[in-house]
Image (cartoon, rainbow, N blue to C red):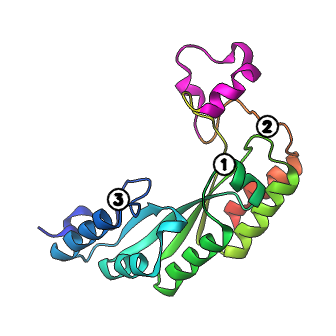
Amino acid sequence: ASLARLGRTIHIVDDTFTANKAVCFAVLREIARMGGGTPFRIDSRADRLDEQVVDGLAAAGCSHVAIGFESGSDRILAAMRKGESKTQMARAVALCRRRGIAVTGYWMAGYPEETDADLLQTIAFARRLELDRYSLSMFAPYPGSQLFADHLGQWGGLVDSDPWHLFNQATHPAINDNLSEKVLDQFWALSDA
């Protein structure tokens, strides 16, 4: 069977396709065995995109990688327990560029305690990376997470027994009132870059 029959581009839906190298390379080998020929895109963490992985992705026909950067503020990355540095993030982008792989960056605003200064650092870092696309969202603490439990009192009667409909990238109860409209507008303008 050929991958070409599946369409113009395949999106491998896996939050961190590259998390397990053995599985990643097994899938890439299977893509090659099937004749490749159809570009595909993946999602990954920056710290999982080393030279070996990026070379393997490019050889198998990966045309696009989406990376969850989340923030460009060291303080907020630490608060998130992201476990990645901005140096690792910049290196992942450079490796993808070197192999002709487009990069989308996932960014968020509104993390608890994030300030205008933090968000301005994110905006500056995102611009410095010169990505192909910017996917922007507001922070949403999902029900069941520790951050959701920590901030439940802020929403009063807004959250019912089935709150899932309130939580997505565009509409949800805001938990951060530290950000100015001016800086948020600059954040949203990244998608126009």
User: Relative to residue 162, is residue 76 drawn left or right?
Assistant: right
Quick one: label 3 or label 1, which is nearer the N terminus? 3
Q: Nearer the viewer, residue 134 or 20?
A: 20
Give the Cα separation between the discs numbered 2 and 1. Answer: 15 Å
- Residue at image point 75% right, 60% down: 74
Q: Residue at x 61, y 54 (%)?
A: 82
Left or right of 180 on screen, residue 94: left
Where 51 falls versus 143 (above or below)? below
Label 2: state its secondary structure: loop
* Mark with earlier residue (2, 1): 1
**Three-letter code for the amino acid on which mark 2 is drawn:** Asn
Tell me the kind of residue under disc 3.
Answer: Ile
Mark 3, other Cα within 10 Å: few <14 / some 14–19 / many ≥20? few
Please tell me whether residue 161 belongs to the stretch shown in magenta: yes
Q: Residue at x 69, y 55 (%)?
A: 77
**Snapshot quadrant of residue 64:** bottom left
**What x and y, as percent, mark residue 68?**
56, 58
Image position of 130 with respect to 155: above or below = below
Nearer mark to the viewer, of 2 and 1: 1
Q: Are marks 3 and 2 in contact (CB under 8 Å)?
A: no
Residue under circle 3? 12
Tell me the mark number nearer the camera, choosing from 3 and 2: 2
Q: Is residue 73 visible?
A: no
Q: Is residue 20 above or below residue 100?
A: above
Q: Nearer the viewer, residue 132 or 153?
A: 153
Range shown magenta: 146-168
Pointer 1 residue: 80
Q: What residue would you read off at disc 2?
A: 176
